[in-house]
Image (tube, rainbow, N blue to C red):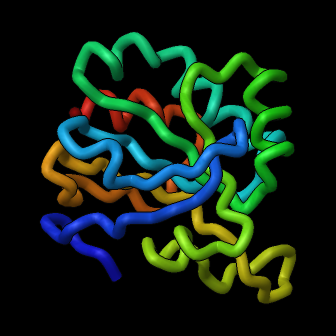
Amino acid sequence: MLQVGDQAPDIQVRTDSGEDFRLSQMKGKRVVLYFYPRADTPGCTVEACEFRDDIQAFGGKGAAVIGVSPDTPAAQAKFKRKFDLPFTLLADQDKTAAEAYGVYKEKNMYGKKVMGIERTTFVISPEGNIEKIYLKVKSKGHAAEVLAGL
């Protein structure tokens, strides 16, 4: 499990626009990297829209917001358009980013054990180290909690 102070894994995935993305491209900027289970579902929409609504404040603190889920680039693009999300969404279809960050876990859904993304947020320093980890995130109010922590 990653700890505060660890070097953030340098993930490489596709963006919502189908472009290649490497986390190391963000060096020199603080990054709020949030993992969510699935685009355009109720909890994920609440979380994304709260980040959207506070995006100016995140920018004012020098932080870029980036969302990650195992959806396709097309699904991420549709989600981004539908809710006018002003930040990059990453398509982690093979779950390599989720596994690198330790958020692809066994979950209990309606009494059944299934593998899935555990909603988690990492704040990454401009130097590429993990500054803060928010585990088992509740969607509502999370963006404000992260903002207050910056």
Q: In the image, residue 136 lies at what x, y percent?
A: 50, 62
Q: In the image, residue 114 lies at what x, y percent?
A: 78, 84
Quarter holding the N terminus is bottom left
Q: Residue at x 53, y 79 (%)?
A: 99
Q: Residue at x 52, y 27 (%)?
A: 51
- Write down the quadrant of residue 40 in the picture: top right
Residue 72 or residue 34, whichever sits in front: 72
Q: In the image, residue 95 lies at what x, y percent?
A: 64, 73
Q: Is residue 4 above or below residue 72?
A: below
The reply to whether residue 41 is visible in this rendering is: no
Q: In the picture provided, is 145 more to the left or to the right than 119?
A: left
Q: Residue at x 23, y 21 (%)?
A: 61
Q: Is residue 54 above or below residue 64?
A: above
- Write down the quadrant of residue 126 in the picture: top left
Q: In the picture provided, is 102 more to the left or to the right than 148?
A: right
Q: In the picture provided, is 78 more to the left or to the right than 70?
A: right
- Write down the quadrant of residue 10 in the picture: bottom left
